[in-house]
Amino acid sequence: MKKMIYEVKQSGIHGKGLFATCKIKKGDIIGHIKYNPADEDGIYVLWIDDKTGIRVDCDLKYINHNTKPNACYCDDLDVVALKNISKGEEITHDYGDDWA
């Protein structure tokens, strides 16, 4: 069984957040997004393009916004560390100007 490298906890940024349970190195894959197609916008919906939305159906949906993120979503829907992340540190992503 693969060790989970993150957990969901209350966040000082907003509601729930995703936190590292161990040191995560720059370039490490934090997780792969599990999803279902979405026809309309919602709190956990990511838009791939103007017509394609996905509803995130896993704990990665709790990644909060930060203009200085330590993780990013890749085209293959992996979440990857942009820099070293310490144990206990919140994992964040830059939502961009349209969503922040």
Image (cartoon, rainbow, N blue to C red):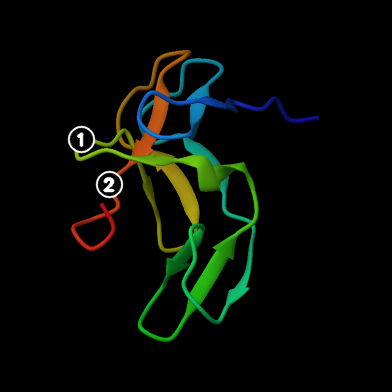
Dividing the picture into quarters, in which one does residue 75 lie? bottom left
Q: Secondary structure at mark 2?
A: loop
In primary-sequence order, the first of circles 2 and 1 is 1
Q: Secondary structure at mark 1?
A: loop
The relative height of residue 69 versus residue 73 in the rendered view (above or below) is above
Tell me which amino acid carries mark 2.
Asp
Coordinates of residue 24 in the picture (x, y in percent): 45, 23
Please, which residue is most extreme toward the front here?
15
Count of residue discs? 2
Of 37 and 30, the residue lying toward us:
37
| 73 relative to 2 in the view: left or right | left
**Residue denoted by label 2:** 94
Q: Residues within 10 Å of mark 1 (few under 14, many from 20)?
A: few
Q: Kindly identify the residue that appears in the image at 34 percent across and 22 percent down.
A: 84
Coordinates of residue 7 in the picture (x, y in percent): 60, 26
Tell me the tag on residue 68: 1
| 69 relative to 24 in the view: left or right | left
Coordinates of residue 30 in the picture (x, y in percent): 51, 37
Q: Kindly identify the residue that appears in the image at 47 percent across and 13 percent down.
A: 87
Tell me which amino acid carries mark 1.
Lys
Quick check: marks 2 and 1 in contact, CB under 8 Å?
yes
